[in-house]
Image: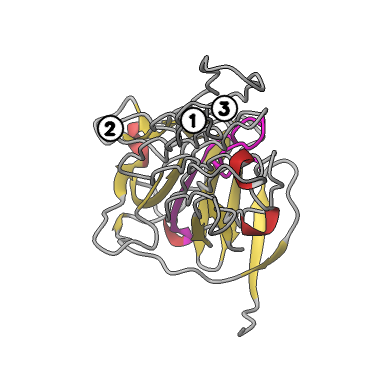
Amino acid sequence: MKKIDTPLTVEGKGHKNKKSRRGKSFGYQVLGFGSGGGGPICIAYDFFIVSGGGGGVSAYGGGGGGGGVHFSYGAPGTAGVTKNDACGNISIQIGAGGSGNSGPGGGYSPYAAGDGGTSIAFKCEPTAVTVKGGGGADTRHNNGRAAPTPGGGSGGGGGCFHLAGTSGGAGSCYGNPGSGAATYSCSPSRFRSGSGGGACTAATAGGSGGNGAAGCGKASDIEGSTKNFGCGGVGSGVSNCLNGRGDGGNPSNPTASQGGGGGRAGAGADGVVYLRFPTSCKPANMGVSPGCNSIITTGACTVLKFVVSGCVTFT
């Protein structure tokens, strides 16, 4: 891989300088007087929005569906959002991950995990971009939950089967379906649950033909280094090496702030919102609040990263 010596700096709490990969920027437009002038500045923001992942369920339950992923960065033909800094602060909402659940080992009662929460960029404005969360998993004998719709993520995984197979929940427009458990009477296949769907691929069911896999997330280098967003959670009895997540999390705990689904009673990960634009357009008085959100400089671009709900400020 070609090494690119591009500095990556972070303004905000809890970050360190590190090297980055240069990402492509799409749809940028510089209007107004620029950051060096005294007048208003129009900024064309490329967005990358991830909602909360669905929760997983223990006791032969499934993995949660990955949160929805919607973006203009790296997506030719998808327009960003242009705003004038004189219009005031920009509100951002971050969707929470869905809660996990500990369903019973037997019986037929549903014990569904929670769905992921909604992330919104440019909240309370006509230009608002809204992405709903991933669906929660369910326990033994029950199907996974569908992702919230419209504008949601991936479906949750179904629990392991008893007399008949289970199915995964349906995905919405920013995700894919979860998987269920096929009807196989032989151990250990009979105890494999379904997994959550991911932003890029559906989950696959296990059985005599294999262990099954959770859905894969969307890879992006929007903040410099490449990460995976909206990965599906792993169902019980599914081999760790075939989980399909690629987000650095173990089967129960998805990586924080990447919208992955939870597995084996684990909660889903919270979402994240990125706004990216050319640094040449950055107003001198731009900031983000609260302090756990950050401003990152990567190459010739500035990235505003929100891991909790907050605001872009111009004071």
Counting from the top left corner in percent of width and height, residue 118 is at 43, 29
The residues tagged by marks 2 and 3 sit, at their Cα atoms, a distance apart of 28 Å
Q: Is residue 142 on the magenta stretch? A: no
Q: Quadrant of residue 254?
A: top right
Q: Main secondary structure of the magenta part?
A: loop
Q: Camera-side residue: 59 or 230?
A: 59
Residue 315 shows up from this direction = no
Would you name the residue on which mark 1 appears? 163
Residue 266 relative to residue 49: left or right: right
Disc number placed over residue 140 in the picture, else none: 3
Residue 81 relative to residue 91: left or right: left
Amino acid identity at mark 1: Leu
Span shown in magenta: 256-279
Pointer 2 or 1: first along the chain? 2
Residue at left 27%, top 36%? 127
Pointer 3 or 1: first along the chain? 3
Would you name the residue on which mark 2 appears? 150
| Name of the residue lying farthest toward the front | 185
Residue at left 57%, top 38%? 63
Q: What is the number of callouts on the image? A: 3
Residue at left 63%, top 39%? 191
Q: Camera-side residue: 79 or 254?
A: 254
